[in-house]
Structure formats: C-alpha cells, structure tokens
Image (tube, grey):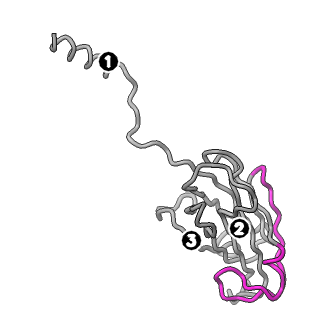
Amino acid sequence: MSFIFSFLLAIALLLTPLIPATAATPSASFLLTSPNGAGFQYELSAPNPEQPVTFQVDGSSDPPAAKLYGYLGGRFGNSTTIITFPEKLVPTTWDENPIKLSAIAIGVSEGEPTGGCGILYGYYTDYDAKGLGFYFNQAQSSPGQDCGDFGVTTHYEISAQIDNAAPSVSLN
C-alpha cells in the first residue's frame, strides 16, 4: 500500500508546476529626472519609523538601503529609476510620509551646492506597493530651511514637476 501511495505522490509532483523558492518582493518604482540637464544631488530616506522603506537604483547590484544618495544631470545622466521596497504592504496617506526625497541644486562646473533645495514626500496609494504618489513640501523647501541631511541652508526653492500617474518627479 505504501508503494502505491509513494508512486502516486511522485506522479503528482511531476505533474505539478514548479513553484519558485522565493516570491518577488513587492516594490514600486519612479523616474527621477533633470530634463534640462541641471545638476542635482538627491537623498532618499524613510523618515517614518512606522513605515520602513528601502531604496535601490534600478539596475544596480547594490542591495536596497535605508538611505540612498545620488546625482542627476551633467555627466551623471538626466534620469534614473528608483525602486522602493516598503516593509508594510498597506496604502499610506500623504501625511504618513514613508518616503522623503531631498534634492539640492549643484553648480554644473564646480559641483558645489548652489543653495537651491526641494523636499518631496512619497506615499503608497495601494496595497502591495502597487501605487506611488508624491507631493512637494513648500514649507521645508523655503529659504532659510535646512535641506535634508546635506548640511546646506536653502537660499531658493527649486521647482519640481510631479506626475503621480507615471509616477515621475522632474527637478528644475
């Protein structure tokens, strides 16, 4: 009897499609651009400890990190795709701020901060990271404010065009 059971089990396993050992990690990505080629340094972080998020540049072999720094414009290219990996797979509201994007304008020739700053926040609009939205925080981007963790005081507010349908953020 056990031989027949083992034989039937083996046949069932052969006919069952293989299931991958690990399922894909839910993520949401967005395009970050500098359409006119202006130079920017950016930092992504997860300011809300109740909504942990990690970040990775698309195509990078580096593992996702709690903070991600990078450059846009000039020799760094005018766009990059950022992948976000939320730990909690539930929608968030705009004021829960699971994602913070800080950007400072840098001079094209010398690569030094010019005093231009923009602070944006991102949030998840659907379960399993299936939607991503952003908004520009004008109060934190205003002159006299500290710009993220860059150690730079804002002299002027950079502009950002946000397309939450794409999603994408264009810095100007």
Please report whichever mark, 3 or 1, sits nearer to the chain's N-terminal start: 1
Q: Position of residue 100 (x, y in %)?
A: 68, 68
Q: Residues within 10 Å of mark 3 (few under 14, many from 20)?
A: some
Q: Position of residue 118 (x, y in %)?
A: 77, 75
**Above or below, comparing residue 93 to residue 136 in the picture:** above
Q: Main secondary structure of the magenta part?
A: loop
Q: Residue furthest front?
A: 50
Q: Is residue 150 left or right of residue 114?
A: left
Instruction: Give the numbered dot on residue 111.
Output: none
Please report whichever mark, 3 or 2, sits nearer to the chain's N-terminal start: 3
Seen at 61% across and 73% down, the residue is 70
**In this figure, what is the number of numbered marks?**
3
- Inspect the image, locate mark 1, and give the three-letter code of the amino acid beneath it: Ala
Q: Residues within 10 Å of mark 1 (few under 14, many from 20)?
A: few
Q: Does the CB distance between marks 3 and 1 fall below 8 Å?
A: no
| Nearer to us: label 1 or label 2 | 1
- Per the image, is 162 magenta? yes
Seen at 65% across and 75% down, the residue is 75
Q: Position of residue 30 (x, y in %)?
A: 68, 57
Q: Position of residue 31 (x, y in %)?
A: 69, 59
Please report whichever mark, 1 or 2, sits nearer to the chain's N-terminal start: 1
Q: Is residue 28 visible?
A: yes
Instruction: Give the numbered dot on residue 12.
Output: 1
**Above or below, comparing residue 96 to residue 22 in the picture:** below
Residue carrying label 3: 67
Q: Which residues are magenta?
A: 138-166
Q: Residues within 10 Å of mark 2 (few under 14, many from 20)?
A: many
Residue carrying label 2: 78
